[in-house]
Image (cartoon, grey):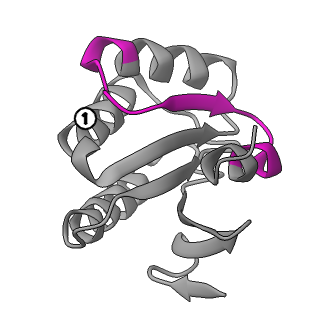
Amino acid sequence: MLEVINANKIFIMNHNAGEILSINVSGLKDDTSPMRAIMDDMFSRLAKPSVTRNIAFHIYGTRVSEPDAARIAAAFKEHEGHIRRLAIVGAGFMSLWRLKKCVRKQGINVPVRFIFDINEAKDWLTGGH
């Protein structure tokens, strides 16, 4: 069952009897304004429910700049009360390095994993591995 929220960029999926909020910003190259719009939409929706969620943040093929990495990490820190687990999925080498640095700097107090495979991420998010 999928609940589509923003043109298949943000949706809720069920996996192994658990629920995952999936945010897909895959394939964004040079113009980061679409990623910012998706992030703004996601965080406005994330703050509304009183439940915490597992989040899969897909960034396959997306170049995450230093300012965007800082903004993403700060946004996850600001909303960490609504996050149970966070998987950042599919980051390339430089994006991964930038995101890890910014997540560490923010001191996010929820379990965060950087995973390349979406199936592994779904298993971890729903209590598998």
Q: Residue at x 80, y 41 (%)?
A: 117
Q: Residue 19 in magenta?
A: no
Q: x, y (%) of residue 115?
A: 70, 33
Quadrant placement of the N terminus? bottom right
10 vs 129, nearest the viewer? 129
* Figure quadrant of residue 70: top left
In the image, taking residue 46 as reference, residue 16 lies left or right, namely: right
Circle 1 SS class: helix
Quadrant placement of the C terminus? top right
The answer to whether 47 is drawn above or below residue 91 in the figure is below
Q: Amino acid at mark 1?
A: Lys
Residue picked out by circle 1: 77
* Figure quadrant of residue 124: top right
* Figure quadrant of residue 22: bottom right
Q: x, y (%) of residue 15?
A: 71, 67
Q: Which residues are magenta?
A: 104-121
Circle 1 Cα neighbour tier, 10 Å, few/some/many (<14 / 14–19 / ≥20): some
Q: Residue at x 45, y 48 (%)?
A: 31
